[in-house]
Amino acid sequence: GNASAVFKCIESNTKGKQGRVTKREFRQLQDAHEQQVDAKSKLEQATKALNKAMHNMDVKVESLFQMPDAGSSSPSHSGRASGAGAVWFVRKAIDNAKAKAVAGVAFLEVQHTLEEAQVARGLELAMEGGDRGELENWIRVAQEKQVPRLRIQAAQ
């Protein structure tokens, strides 16, 4: 499944063959590419599910960081409307995408979304804590990180 391993295999098998690739090697490369596309798709789905949950004010941010219910294997399974485990799914999708050698550009939006979730979590904890100074700091950070406006308004 690792694309770099496939390339190494092809490279080692093509020495002396003037760059020809066998059908078997081509299938390996094709399989690796398909796994890479699938990993990128799962990463995008998990990120969209987290974004959707972040904009749902009925969802407590802390629940996004909890491990999902047993039997949930993707963001689209039942129970996902609550957003429970959305960050867990994103992190798992990141690990899978890295293992499949997905291009680094795909991770930019994901990292931004995870940062938003972390800041929203801090904001929520500051609201529960009652320290006005800390809450104001989290509100400022949340505005900078573009946390959904409704979450910031709820804190104010």
Image (spheres, grey):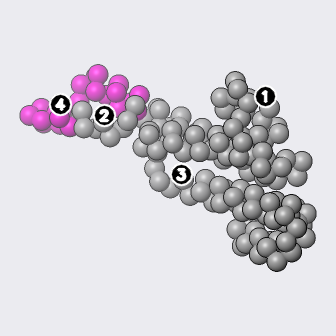
Judging by the rendered image, the residue that carries numbered circle 3 is: 106
Q: Considering only order in the chain, which callout, 3 or 1, is on the residue closer to the N terminus?
A: 1
Q: Amino acid at mark 1?
A: Ser
In the figure, residue 122 lies in which quadrant?
bottom right
Residue 103 appears in the rendering: yes
Binning the other alpha carbons within 10 Å of mark 2 as few (below 14), some (14 to 19) or many (20 upward) gives some
Q: Amino acid at mark 2?
A: Val
Q: Considering only order in the chain, which callout, 4 or 3, is on the residue closer to the N terminus?
A: 4
Residue occupying image coordinates x 73% and y 30%: 69
Q: Amino acid at mark 4?
A: Asn
In the figure, residue 23 lies in which quadrant?
top left
Q: Amino acid at mark 3?
A: Ala
Q: Position of residue 16 (x, y in %)?
A: 8, 34
Measured Cα–Cα span from mark 3 to mark 4: 31 Å
Task: From the viewer's side, name the closer residue of 7 and 62.
Answer: 62
Judging by the rendered image, the residue that carries numbered circle 4 is: 13
Inspect the magenta stretch and tell me whether residue 81 lies in it: no
Judging by the rendered image, the residue that carries numbered circle 2 is: 6
Measured Cα–Cα span from mark 2 to mark 4: 10 Å
Judging by the rendered image, the residue that carries numbered circle 1 is: 78
Answer above or below: position of 133 versus 36. below
Tally of marks: 4
